[in-house]
Image (cartoon, helix red, strand yellow):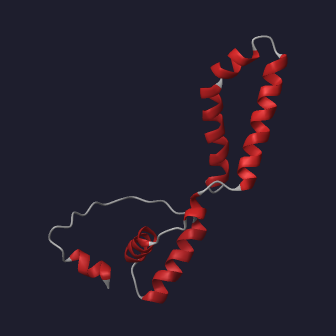
Amino acid sequence: MGIRRQALDPGLHWRRLQVRFASAELELLAQRAGRNGLSLSAAVRELVSSALSTDLPTEAMTDSPASLAALLAAEHSLLMVASVLPEGERRMHELNARAAVAAEARLALFREPGP
C-alpha cells in the first residue's frame, strides 16, 4: 500500500494533526476502516491521499448558476435600498466588512453539525 511505503521514506516529515469528526462521519470512517482492515488513522490518511490525488473537472470548481442568480438578486436589492436612503451608498460601503463577517457566520451554520 502507498501509505506504508511512504512511512519508510526517510525524507518524509511527519506532523500530528488533531481533527474533529461529527458522530455520523466517525461512524462511517470506522466502518470503512473495519472493511479494509485499517486503523482509523490509516483510513483517514488513505482518504486524504485519494482526495488530494483526484483532479476535479473544471466545471466542478465554477460557481453554479443558482448561486450567481442569488448573488445578483442580493446585490440588486442592496442597490435599490441604498438608492432611496440618505447617504445610502456611503453607508453601504461602510458596512461591507460587517456584512462579510455576518455572511461567514451564517454560512457556518450550514457547514457545522448542530449540537
Q: Residue furthest left?
A: 10
- Tell me the residue at 53%/70% (across/down): 26
* Nearer to us in this view, 16 or 67: 67
Q: Which quarter of the figure is the N terminus placed in?
A: bottom left
- Tell me the residue at 58%/67% (across/down): 23
Along the horizontal axis of the image, is 25 left or right of 80? left
Q: Position of residue 34 (x, y in %)?
A: 47, 85
Q: Position of residue 11 (x, y in %)?
A: 16, 67
* Nearer to us in this view, 63 or 105: 63
Asked if one can make out residue 115 in the rendered structure from this viewpoint, the answer is no
Q: Residue furthest front?
A: 58
Asked if one can make out residue 30 in the rendered structure from this viewpoint, the answer is yes
- Tell me the residue at 75%/41% (across/down): 72
Residue 65, above or below 52: above
Residue 96, above or below 87: below
Q: Quadrant of residue 101?
A: top right
- Tell me the residue at 57%/59% (across/down): 61
